[in-house]
Image: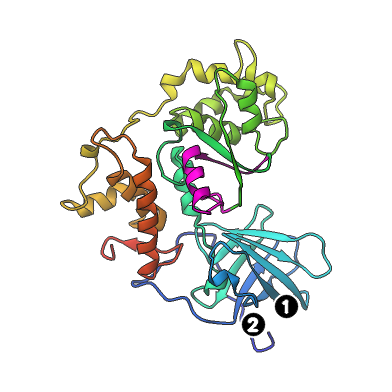
Amino acid sequence: FKSIRYKPSAPRDDDDGPIDTGGPPKARPNVQIASAEAFHPDWDDTDMLVFERPIDNAWQHNEDERRAGRFFSRRNKAVGDWRLDSNVLTLLWTGSQRPDIVKAAASEKRWRNDEGMVLTIIEPDVLPDWLAPTVGQGNLALADQHFECPTCFFDLYKFPAGVMRKGRRRVCDHYIHVQCAEYLKKNKETRCPACGVPFNTIKKMPDLIKDGREWFTVVDADCSGNLTQDEIEAGMGAVLPMDRVKLRKAIDMNWADWDPDGDGTIDLNEFLRDGKGLREFILRNLSALSKENMVARPQDVPQLDSHPLEWFEYWDQDGSGTLEKMEIIRAMIKSFCVNNNGEPLVKPAHDMRKIAALIWHDMGYHEFDSLSFTEF
């Protein structure tokens, strides 16, 4: 720790865009330490953290194995413990019962949380294996944006969907196809494919029409007895062919009618109220809120072999000029794992996901890397 000299980093903006690979992927270095700059609104000054390589090497044989080690804080002049689960980094400070938890989002070198804490890796330029997140947030962004299963990338409503649980409690606020969750369990990949949180059971979504009360209970991820707009949107998209933009606009415009007390949430009675409840509004306006093209026919998608540039640009839906790992996997699945009518083939999608991920890593690309068309 003493061998590290602190050099304040240059001012940074808040751009969390993907790392510019600048050509061929860079190999992960075999280093014993990594340094980071940490900021928190409650601190008087930024902190310099030095992370030490884990002593236990079990993670080298299983990327899902929890990684843990020690870190040194320049501000506190003390040693603490760090723990990495997928893309979630927990910092356990000496003498404090309350840890700080940050998550890697669009970049593996920038970690943050809702409290305003930001941790930026300074050295090395490319993270070592032992500190690199194994789940990219791009997976979540893609699936969440389109109401898709984060495993097969097909619409959630196409097949029975469910929530992931540990025992009887939801582990996160994401949804997944029941058959995709069973596939993960069979392959001992019992982590949410969107956020990496472990699960051991799957709860199938109740029927919104026949059992609105139970549907409400399952969607209530934090067990608060109330639903936020985000919870309602995600829950509706899991069981109905909803267009997210249309659904959000409709909910925003009518929210005051369902939330008369203005507390930002709705309870079960406000959800089920006869004539004026949110559930009845959604079902009554389902056709107007549905996706326009619920089945993408193969002939509507550019052919990769004959029109590679058009194919690349078609799947570059954010217009970044690059494709990240999950964008490529999603594109491969939706291009080659459908029948002639555009209907999804889930088992081939599972195989394609595994093959594409292996190729990505075998070529030396990291979880947060992206490819330009030239590299592709």
Instruction: Give the class, few, some or many, for how many residues have Cα within 10 Å of label 1's Cα (few <14, many ≥20).
Output: some
Q: Residue furthest top?
A: 275
The kind of residue on which mark 2 rests is: Tyr
Q: Circle 1 sits in a helix, a strand or a loop, which is it?
A: loop
Instruction: Give the class, few, some or many, for how many residues have Cα within 10 Å of label 2's Cα (few <14, many ≥20).
Output: some
Vertical comparison of 1 with 199: above or below: below
The reply to whether dot 1 and dot 2 touch (C-beta < 8 Å) is: yes
Q: Which residues are magenta?
A: 169-196
Q: Position of residue 24 (x, y in %)?
A: 34, 73
Q: Position of residue 351 (x, y in %)?
A: 36, 51
Point 70% across, 25% down: residue: 267
Residue at the spot of label 2: 6
Q: Is residue 101 visible?
A: yes
Point 79% across, 59% down: residue: 98
Q: Residue furthest bottom?
A: 3
Vertical comparison of 322 with 241: above or below: below
